[in-house]
Image: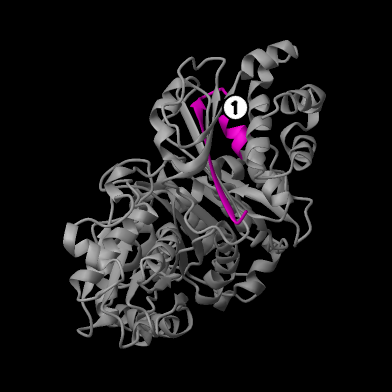
Amino acid sequence: MSSNNKSNSQNEKVLLKGNEAFAEAAIRGGLRFYFGYPITPQSEIPEFMSRELPKRGGVFLQAESELGAINMAYGAGAAGGAVFISSSSPGIALMQEGMSFLCSAEVPLVALNVSRGGPGIGGIQPGQADYFQTTRGGGNGDYKIPVFAPASIQEAIDLIYEAAELADKWRNPIMIFADGIMGQMMEPVSLPEQRPFIEAGDIRKAKPWAATGYGEDASKRSIVKSLRMQPDELEAHVEKLFEKYARAEKELVRVETRDLDDADIVLVAFGTVARIAREAIDILAERGIKAGLIRPISLWPFPYATFDEIGARTKAVISAELSMGQMLEDVKIGVGKRLPVRLIHRTGGMIPTSLELADSAEKIYIESGGTGFNNILINNTGLQPGRRSGDKEVL
Amino acid sequence: MSSQKLFFAGSGGQGIILMGQMVTYAAMFEDKQTTYYPSYGPEMRGGTANCTVIVSDKAVSSPLIYEADCLIAMNLPSLLKFESIVKPGGIMLLNSSIISEKASRSDIRVYYVPTLDVARELGAPKSANMVMLGAAVRATNVVKRETVERVMREKAFTGKKADTIPLNLKAFESFSV
């Protein structure tokens, strides 16, 4: 199908596959350089970039590996180029050393993880088990990377477009955490206007820190590096980085909430799982259980303070995720000792249906002392009315 | 209609993905909320292919479904595997040109669509999926038929493929449910 979208005006909707939309958003955001290596479920991105970027004045370069890609990104970014890279879980894992270097050297980058099941080479179906890798840092040393997790193709476009600016503003990599479902699905979207690419001659002015050589004033040569042999110098540098991260913790928190003040139970989910949770919330409402939702959009900084908005009526907080329980730890920090925190999960590329999520949430609600109007039936039979989650596989 | 969930299933090369994308485009043209999600994996021509299309008046929540308002089964494995996902009172369309089995359920509406036979009669055997798409759109009213025509002209059959529009349209309009 033709997905030519260059001629559309800003508000005209176009139908785009997630991966193509991510790539288009990166180009329109002004990210002129792309280095990558194919991996399912995001190979449409390098394919799209190889076709589009050269035509539009950018540079596409297929690296020999993900290690090559991240280090090309480090080099191009250090020289002032606006860089976008993408991969999927095992490929992102290979890039972690580079991420640590970029953070230390304060080099901007927008990186996208279209994540899949792990550990190891894992599988190619969707997963969220890179949560720790992404939010805690898979590389060495003290550093942080702001991470945003979109739940729709439109939100992904908006976040990638904004991330292009944030990376420069914060002089740090910004990570977008999508999943295989988002990469493969199609939704109607509006695309933002093309931001102009920075020309090479304008880099010294736009990014005075960039390694652009001596220029006119030989005393002001910029050096971009992560090696600091003197411990006092390194400590001061890390302290400086963490002053920046402390500001980021105040300014970059993003979260969507629903009905926290009078919810019987609160679901916490991000990305595609948050959308499944929204449908599960509708199913729970039919069963007389009011479920609230916390959807962290920023995974780091995590919206801990949002958990204080949960009202007195709530019996338990549930982290729903495609991992063995990684975001769960942040949810526990957010909730503290106030309420029980439970986990609903699938992993390895399996995805819960909204019905499965609703059934599990209802069970947790009852176990936590809640009473929905269906619970007499549950108590008598041990079964819930309607179809059981075990009956149906997700499609 | 507030929301319809359609599931297209068949084998690679039968035009499953195209059918799903055309409904999604049509829904977008009608300013409806819509999400399309294909199965993905190590797939190939002759392997299995399926996709989910959700068309709704409000924002689509889960892109994944566990039950469908309408199943479009283009081959026998799809019938056997997915017949049970159709909601009671829902619709199933079977490609009766290559599926000789009958539906086993009596609580759904079933249409037997001889897609290949109809397409061959029109002299357009490659348009069997358009015969099925026409039948599915008529049976579900998920989008307007004229919107699908617009999708053919503006999205599905552009450039060199524009020559195929008259026959594809004929195939699309050929089966009355």
- In this picture, residue A187 sits left or right of residue A242: right
Q: Is residue B61 magenta?
A: no
| Rendered image coloring scheme | one colour
Q: Which of the 4 image quarters holds residue A300?
A: bottom left
Secondary structure of residue under mark 1: loop
Seen at 65% across and 13% down, the residue is B117
How far across and how far down the image is residue A356, in percent? Answer: 32, 54
Is residue A214 in view from this perspective? Answer: yes
Q: Residues within 10 Å of mark 1 (few under 14, many from 20)?
A: many
Q: Which residue is mark 1?
A: B15
* Amino acid beneath label 1: Gly
Q: Is residue B5 magenta?
A: yes
How far across and how far down the image is residue B19, in percent? Answer: 62, 34
Tell me the subunit letter for badge 1: B
Seen at 60% across and 43% down, the residue is A48
Q: Quadrant of the C terminus of chain B?
A: top right
How far across and how far down the image is residue A244, in percent? Answer: 42, 82
Q: Is residue A172 above or below residue A81?
A: below
Seen at 37% across and 75% down, the residue is A302
Seen at 37% across and 68% down, the residue is A226
> Magenta segment, which residues?
B1-20
Q: Is residue B80 above or below residue A103?
A: above
Q: Is residue A290 above or below residue B48?
A: below
Q: Is residue B42 above or below residue A170?
A: above
